[in-house]
Amino acid sequence: MKTVDLVVIGSGAAGMAAAVEAKKNGVDDILILEKEERLGGILNQCIHNGFGLTEFKEELTGPEYLQRFVDQVKELKIPYKLNSQVIDLSKDKVVTYSNKEDGLVKIQAKAIVMATGCYERNAGAIMLPGDRCSGVITAGTAQRYLNINGLMVGKRIVILGSGDIGLIMARRLTLEGAKVLCVSELMPYSAGLNRNIQQCLIDFNIPLYLSRTVSKVVGKNGRLEKVILSAVDDKLQIIPGTEMEFECDTLILSVGLIPYISLLNYIDCPTSSTRGAVVNQYMETMVDGIFTAGNCLHVHDVVDFVSDEARLAGRSAALYLQNKINNSENKINIKPGNGLSYVLPQFILENSLEDIVIKFRVRRPVQDQIVWIKSGETVIMKQIKPVMIPSEMVMIKIAKDKLVGIKEDIVVSLEDR
Amino acid sequence: MKQIHDVLIIGAGVTGTMIARELSKYVLDVVILDKNNDAGDATSSANSAIIHSGYDPEPGTLKAKFNVLGNAKYPKLVEELDVPFIQCGSLTIAIEDEQLPVLKELAERSKINGVPVQLLNKEEVLKMEPNINPEVKGALFAPTAGIIDPFNLVVHAMENAIDNGVTFLRSQEVLDIKKENDVYKVKTNKDEFYAKIVINAAGVFSDKIAQMVEPIDWAITPRKGEYFLLDHYADGLVNHTIFPLPSKKGKGVLVSQTSSGNYIVGPSSELASPDDVSTDGETLGNIRRAATLMVPSIPFNQTIRVFAGERATCTRHDFIIEYAKSDKNFINVAGIESPGLASSPAIAEYVVETLVRPLITLKSNPKFNPCIKKYHRMHYLSEEEQQKAIAEDSDFGEIICNCEHISLGEIKEALSRSCPPVSIKGVKRRTRSGYGKCQGGFCQPKVLLLLAKHYGVSPTEIPLAEDGSYIIDHEIKEAK
Amino acid sequence: MKELTCIVCPRGCRLKVDDNMEVTGNTCPRGKIYAINELTHPTRTITSSVRVSNRPYTLVSVKTDKPVPKDKMFEVMKEIDKISVEAPTRIGQIVLANVLGTDSNVVITKDID
């Protein structure tokens, strides 16, 4: 069996950033495996701009952003294989992939970075009520049809979910001649970025209905004919008598993204409430030498943070290969406290080699909060945040020396000021 | 005048296709019509996918008879038709002490029906199924029950029948049937057909079809069953099909692994209009509660799909497999609800050997081959077999479906057979491409373009499922 | 007093502009520029795609290299729709110069080999 020091699974922003960083940190024997025919992952279909302000200090489209990484991969001569799907993974890091040219190939990896991105929650996952007809499609799939293949999924469109892909698609479909009737959001607040509400909805007079969801999908002759939107109460239950009917041929679902980690499920790698793997501060999973970053760990709001997180994973993989990460160090759990939906990493190994960035999301929009990072009664850090919203990932850096002597679980929680 | 077929079958569900296959053993001109664009598109593909053992139907009924006979045919049938099938056995469980006598009654009934069963006590049940509600009091174990891939079953039966000379015509909705000069004239939305013998296997519409020939004293009152389908990353949740005690409304909500390793939970049982396969939150909530009572730890957050299927429940409360009163050349095979899947091969044999044989000369078809060519299911092949397949055709190395790891070669293979898919759903049901957690989110555009190319049509012509269920509205920026 | 949502970066600051064009609520200088532009001559960068004539069912992405007047978005889209290109394409390649006299070029944003 062929042996490779580092196998990177996936070549989106996370995969390429991790590979480049590993290479820069001394790992020479790397292989990137990409299932599609191009490097770059989903960014290939995200043709809108707004990427890269942190990473490259300029505003780029998705394809331009990914090309910056492709250029680095090529410049550093990092090997990659396209059209190569990883179909199996073992705990001892044997990676099996398949493609046309090589057939079925097994590689013994010494370290792995999982950068497999996420998938979209779909009609089945949200148990969309009503008929099973065509014309109900997830935003990302509609985006691929449109931006890669030039195929429009409809003319009169309702969008369920105000996540960023849904908002971006509202604008994109409108510019391509469709009529977007409205965006309906289950929660009382939008799941998308403020600027996307502005430039994708308000710019085009597309109404956003909050606290409303699809209560019924009605099809005719196989295709969507109308959707019924109903208001929901504060327990998210449908309120009878609040129906709004929209005649439309398409319902686009933008109802959330879920880390895509079937491969880690095969090896019973523990996962967390983000549905990504449980990781330590090195982005290492509970399986020795398997690292993960990007949207397959937790779904990010901004791709620059994906790239940054993946660099940490790539750098850590290099440290691991140099035997500098000691997995037998004491583990200290980090837990989400009051007001948080999750926190990453879920645990840290003592004697951290680097400063630690704690990432979390809040459960609901909040203002004037104190973020407490405590271990028992010991305050590790206290930070004031004027505004936090669930769609935004919050990051707080902790200097490694502040963690010296910490033994008990660390809890991150919010308190009103 | 047009060609006169020996036999015309209305409905290409499991009943119709099994009959077609049975008829193809003889030198006959057989045509089978379906109003949908694929075989097994209605009831046969949206059910529990259980090959029941036969302990449940009332002794003496056609259901009891054909269920037991049909069940016994499956091990050989699935070899011939290359259908995934696991004889995992079923457990019908009692949660309360008062239910124990009912279990005993069922055991008695099993004996009369000729079904091997075993009564289990609490400890035995929990040993076999550790995730069952610990309140369980006992169970009836029926080892001959099995789980099957119902899509492959019907499509492969159709394929086999076509390979043996049967003609399958899709999207042909029968509108009228008349007898003219001793021959049936069957008018559809597209065409007219003539046949000496007509077999009505039209599922939930079989009463409408029967009424085209004569007044009938029975009716189909379709019942809808809603289901959850869960992903396949929770091995060992249950190892057998778990039933509650049956009630008048049916066998109740079951929890079972499927032949593909997913879990299925359902069905409900609601009166519905024909063709209504919608789902609603309230019903699904009830299913969830009923299932959780049996298996408390079902991971419903792994739901990848909810769906509904209709059953051709008949006012006679039994299968109807008989000549029309006014004419022997019209045969009704109606009311085939559960255990229809299990019964179908036995029903088909009975229809041909007992009902058709007296009507027409049955001469053995010397070219009849009971087997279809085996499909490549890459996922289930050994490494060496996979390597060999890819070496012979590199398309088997290119994965199209990320979730289920279905290759381009497997999809092309389905397209190359005699009952090929014409829709995204058709591909999914044959190959499992798009059957996983992303439900085609990633692979659907690839499959759609592949179908468009294969059939030489615009992507706007490719349906998701039935005719009219187009996915692509129009092409933009067409190259002038 | 006008209230705006800044679209310059993902932060999406809530901006307030008073009658003297004084901007508050911004957390960076670009927000101020955006607010004044938005009230005087609002512009948007358009991203779209054009067909690649020698690749079936393939589009290549494009953008306007400068923002165009907001009220001309649909007109610019019509011009973009008329374009088709041949692969290979390179990022930055101009496929339509000075679209509708806006001083903005439509440029390729994706390499297709």
Image (cartoon, coloured by chain):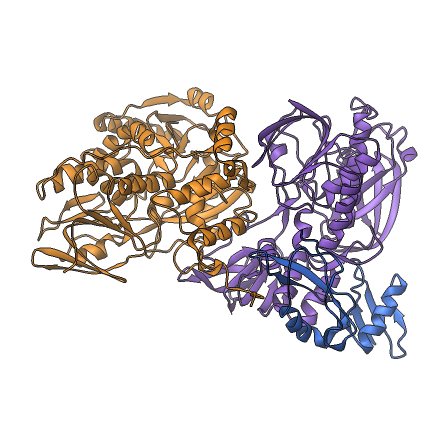
Chain colours: A purple, B orange, C blue
Image location (x, y in percent) of residue B21? 24, 39
Q: Residue at x 59, y 68 (%)?
A: A180
Res B260 quadrant in image? top left
Does A263 sit above or below residue B428? above
Does A186 sit above or below residue A101? below
Q: Quadrant of the N terminus of chain C?
A: bottom right
Image location (x, y in percent) of residue A65? 76, 52
Tally the numbered discs.
Answer: 0
Does B295 sit above or below residue C16? above
Residue B236 visible at all: no
Q: Residue at x 82, y 25 (%)?
A: A322
Determine the residue located farthest toward the bottom in the rendered image.
Answer: C19
Residue B390 visible at all: yes
Does A47 sit above or below residue B421? below
Res A239 quadrant in image? bottom right
Image location (x, y in percent) of residue A296? 68, 41
Q: Is residue B78 left or right of residue A58?
A: left
Image location (x, y in percent) of residue A255? 61, 53
Nearer to me, B240 or B431? B431
Res A32 quadrant in image? top right
Determine the residue located farthest toward the right in the rendered image.
Answer: A401
Q: Residue at x 42, y 20 (%)?
A: B124
